[in-house]
Image (cartoon, rainbow, N blue to C red):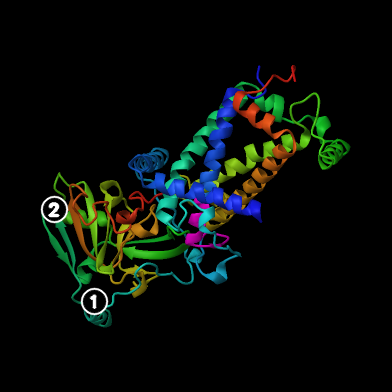
């Protein structure tokens, strides 16, 4: 068995592309009305809890301001993102990836164990024999997979007026459409933060091998 | 700083690449399919005619923002506003058995529906208001649709630099109970900025579908050949015809 299952590798790269397109087209959409509110409604500057800065063309898709074109990218890749995440989750449940690699054990939650993990990270020691991932990795991947990514889908759906008519509980869950929009924005930046950290840690620790493993699958854990 | 420039360069390459792809027919085909998929999913999940959420008076926004055109710059319109729109007519025409010309009094004499709904602009903001007017289905039943009618086109008195505003919807939305021709907002005659004297309320879709300053309702078999052929002023400028996303 390879280090990364084929379903994991396929999803990883499809998801990477989706996230980049969704994030950059999302920044273009944000430029259309760069204010965030809580509750159901909001439109005036004095109602806003955050005045968002304007994102430059090099950070957006397309590279100039176009709400229509940005929405085209966004609603298309929303499908790629959501369907690929669903398929990956089914595969990861079936092939044991979640149970074996992501689920934490009770012993890992001991403060002393977590602290030891943090200190190892700070010393840039990333080898952790036994399991594929250490506690901080499991926690990060777990939060991204089961909290942040699903939140993007749910808040995205909550903002859609057609979806809101069909499933009003989605936006009610967040206390209103504008709250869902605010959460969508905040979680997008949390995911951006995760990606930066993820890339930094790969770069710090055998980047070529890690990238190649995520393409070709890599050796099995036993052999490594 | 150098690394930043490289990153900015990479991002720029990506965005110009995306702009190129974005203009291709293949990409537009995919986008159209994604739009149809969203619409299909909404109808599948909610049934054909789920109702948009309705709110209580306590939820109404203190001020209902006007967007797009918020006035019509003509003496004729100003005279109508001053007089209370005595000569305003809403034509019902196209593929109908009995074409109509309805005055504001005719519209007020029809059975009315009042609904407090949330207006979601494509830009991202929302406002809640209470709308009153007859259901579009009442008017369409009075006129009687011919069997060939597939879409309803809404003609407006406003324009952007001479290009008239217009919108359209399918018969599902046209006959939806919450699709009304509103003449009142929050119990008052429709303000000029919100489309006086008549505007469409087509809940479950984004703001640009809610055509203002209505002058005519037209039943048609196809949207081709009408203005840009995409079913609306903003649709002719790249926005999705199904504005439920």
Tell me where residue A46 appears, x and y as whole percent.
Answer: 56, 71
Q: Residue furthest front?
A: B2
Q: Nearer the viewer, residue A137 or A197?
A: A197
Name the side, left or right, on which A149 lies relative to B146: right
Report the magenta residues as a range: A25-40
Pointer 1 local density, CA inside 10 Å: few below 14, some 14–19, many at least 20: some
The tag on residue B96 is 2
Location of residue A143 by image quarter: top right
**Is residue A86 something one can see in this rendering?**
yes
Question: What residue do we see at 43% from left, 60% from top?
Answer: B121
Tell me where residue B55 appears, x and y as whole percent.
Answer: 46, 59
Chain containing mark 1: B
Q: Is residue B120 magenta?
A: no
Q: Is residue A32 magenta?
A: yes
Question: What residue do we see at 23% from left, 66% from top?
Answer: B107
Name the side, left or right, on which B96 lies relative to A210: left
Tell me where residue A141 appears, x and y as whole percent.
Answer: 68, 36
Tell me where residue A26 appears, x and y as whole percent.
Answer: 51, 51
Location of residue A11 by image quarter: top right
The tag on residue B106 is none
Question: What residue do we see at 76% from left, 38% from top?
Answer: A136
Q: Check the image and report above or below for B82 versus B226.
A: below
Label 1 sits on a secondary structure element that is loop
Question: What residue do we see at 27% from left, 79% from top?
Answer: B81
Location of residue B106 by image quarter: bottom left
**Which residue is disc 1 drawn over?**
B85
């Amino acid at each position: 068995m390879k280090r990364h299952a084929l379903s994991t590798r396929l999803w990883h790269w499809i998801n990477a592309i989706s996230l980049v397109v969704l994030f950059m087209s999302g920044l273009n959409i944000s430029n259309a009305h760069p204010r965030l509110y809580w509750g159901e409604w909001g439109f005036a500057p004095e109602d806003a809890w955050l005045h968002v800065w304007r994102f430059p063309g090099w950070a957006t898709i397309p590279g100039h301001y176009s709400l229509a074109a940005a929405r085209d990218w966004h609603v298309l890749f929303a499908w790629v993102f959501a369907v690929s995440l669903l398929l990956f989750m089914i595969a990861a449940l079936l092939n044991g990836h979640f149970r074996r690699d992501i689920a934490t054990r009770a012993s890992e939650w001991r403060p002393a164990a977590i602290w030891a993990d943090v200190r190892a990270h700070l010393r840039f020691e990333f080898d952790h024999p036994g399991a594929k991932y250490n506690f901080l990795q499991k926690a990060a991947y777990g939060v991204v997979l089961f909290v942040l990514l699903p939140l993007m889908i749910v808040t995205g759906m909550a903002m859609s007026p057609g979806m809101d008519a069909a499933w009003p509980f989605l936006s009610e869950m967040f206390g209103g459409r504008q709250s869902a929009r605010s959460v969508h924005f905040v979680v997008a930046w949390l995911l951006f933060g995760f990606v930066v950290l993820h890339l930094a840690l790969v770069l710090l620790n055998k980047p070529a091998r890690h990238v190649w493993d995520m393409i070709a699958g890599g050796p099995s854990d036993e052999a490594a | 700083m150098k690394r930043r420039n490289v990153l900015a360069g990479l991002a720029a390459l990506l965005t110009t690449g995306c702009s190129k792809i974005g203009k291709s027919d293949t990409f537009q085909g995919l986008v159209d399919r994604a739009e149809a998929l969203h619409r299909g999913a909404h109808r599948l999940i909610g049934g054909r005619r789920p109702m948009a959420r309705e709110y209580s008076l306590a939820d109404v926004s203190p001020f209902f923002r006007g967007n797009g055109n918020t006035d019509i710059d003509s003496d004729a319109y100003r005279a109508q506003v001053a007089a209370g729109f005595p000569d305003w007519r809403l034509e019902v025409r196209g593929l109908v058995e009995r074409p109509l010309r309805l005055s504001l009094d005719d519209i007020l004499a029809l059975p009315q529906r009042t609904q407090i709904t949330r207006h979601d602009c494509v830009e991202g903001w929302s406002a809640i208001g209470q709308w009153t007017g007859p259901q579009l289905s009442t008017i369409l039943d009075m006129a009687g649709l011919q069997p060939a009618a597939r879409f309803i086109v809404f003609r407006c008195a406003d324009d952007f630099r001479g290009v008239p505003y217009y919108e359209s919807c399918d018969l599902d939305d046209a006959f939806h109970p919450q699709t009304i021709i509103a003449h009142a907002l929050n119990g008052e005659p429709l303000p000029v900025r919100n489309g006086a004297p008549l505007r469409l309320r087509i809940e479950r879709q984004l703001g640009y579908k809610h055509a203002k300053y209505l002058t005519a309702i037209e039943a048609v078999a196809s949207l081709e050949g009408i203005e840009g052929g995409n079913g609306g002023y903003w649709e002719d400028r790249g926005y999705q015809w199904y504005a439920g996303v």
